[in-house]
């Protein structure tokens, strides 16, 4: 069944007098649980599309449905809860908090829930073990390799057991071998936990492992 439906969304930005079309009439559906790569050259609209899926921003027209609910129907006050329950995010630059340890970074994603401290800690540890770095709990980001940092970021994205994870160039800062390992991990999480991944990328390795590749060019799906 379709977990995500994008229906004819368009988005433009203004830069001075210039009107920039970032997305033009884009429609697609994503079934669960799958891995979808969103490919396309720089400036083709990938980040704009991802930010609409997380409702960081809204389309000018068209609408998006997640799990049968229209994203534009979620009130501002319900957005944190929506993101917390349904989505995880992974970024090219990992976006970890440098003064916090690996386990504390993962616990941050649990902060909105009123969980006892011990419960938060054990869930964070379980998530880090799941991504293969249970032995690096108290390391700070600078004490971890790029691949390890990205695993912490994935643990943080998964700790709330979201239905899907949105990743923007997750292999972009990793060497080829580490990127391969990360993709193996994503494939395993997809199969074992039924997590649906949507990955904006330039990386052919991501396109090869994805069930499906969506290509954008000048804001259009081609
Ligand atoms: P990609 O992620 O594929 O590189 P983006 O979604 O970042 O593409 O950008 C799509 C187009 O929208 C580009 O032409 C980009 O310059 C433009 N754009 C993105 N964000 C903004 C913004 N905040 N203001 C103006 N133009 C923007
Ligand atoms: P790019 O490297 O393509 O220019 P940006 O730095 O603009 O990308 O954004 C990176 C990603 O972070 C985008 O997918 C964007 O949707 C997402 N993002 C934007 N605002 C937030 C936010 N407040 N919290 C988390 N992620 C965000």
Image (spheres, helix red, strand yellow):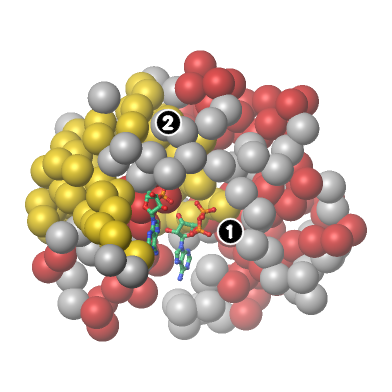
Ranked by sequence position, the earlier of labels 2 and 1 is: 2
Q: Between tags 2 and 1, which lies in front? A: 2
Q: Quadrant of the N terminus?
A: top left
Q: Position of residue 75 (x, y in %)?
A: 18, 77
What distance separates the C-alpha of mark 2 from that of mark 1? Answer: 24 Å
* Residue at the spot 45% in from the left edge and 77% down from the top edge: 113
130, 72: nearer the viewer: 72
48 lies above or below 97:
above
Pick out the residue farthest to the right: 143
Residue occupied by mark 1: 156
Considering the numbered disc 2 on the image, is that residue within a helix, a strand or a loop? strand
* Residue at the spot 46% in from the left edge and 28% down from the top edge: 191
Residue occupied by mark 2: 39
Q: Position of residue 98 (x, y in %)?
A: 77, 70
One can see residue 130 in this view: no
Q: Position of residue 215 (x, y in %)?
A: 34, 28
Q: Is mark 1 within 8 Å of ligand 2?
A: no
One can see residue 207 in this view: yes
96 lies above or below 39:
below
Residue 174 located left or right of residue 171 = right
132, 149: nearer the viewer: 149
Residue 64 located left or right of residue 95 = left
* Residue at the spot 26% in from the left edge and 24% down from the top edge: 222
**Marks 2 and 1 in Cβ contact (< 8 Å):** no
Q: Quadrant of residue 20?
A: bottom left
Considering the numbered disc 1 on the image, is that residue within a helix, a strand or a loop? helix
């Amino acid at each position: 069944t379709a977990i995500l439906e994008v229906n004819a969304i368009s988005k433009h930005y203004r830069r001075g007098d210039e009107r920039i079309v970032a997305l033009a009439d884009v429609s697609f559906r994503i079934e669960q649980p799958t891995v979808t790569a969103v490919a396309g050259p720089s400036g083709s609209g990938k980040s704009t599309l991802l930010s609409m899926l997380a409702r960081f921003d809204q389309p000018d027209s068209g609408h998006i449905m997640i799990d049968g609910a229209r994203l534009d129907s979620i009130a501002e006050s319900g957005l944190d809860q929506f993101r917390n329950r349904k989505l995880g995010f992974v970024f090219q630059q990992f976006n970890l908090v440098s003064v916090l340890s690996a386990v504390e970074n993962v616990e941050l994603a649990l902060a909105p829930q009123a969980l006892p401290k011990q419960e938060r800690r054990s869930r964070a540890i379980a998530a880090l073990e799941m991504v293969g770095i249970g032995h690096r709990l108290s390391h700070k980001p600078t004490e971890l390799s790029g691949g390890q940092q990205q695993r912490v970021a994935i643990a943080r994205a998964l700790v709330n057991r979201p239905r899907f994870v949105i990743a923007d160039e997750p292999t972009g800062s990793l060497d080829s071998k580490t990127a391969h390992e990360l993709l193996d991990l994503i494939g395993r999480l997809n199969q074992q936990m039924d997590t649906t991944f949507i990955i904006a990328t330039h990386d052919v390795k991501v396109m090869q492992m994805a069930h499906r590749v969506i290509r954008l060019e000048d804001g259009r799906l081609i």
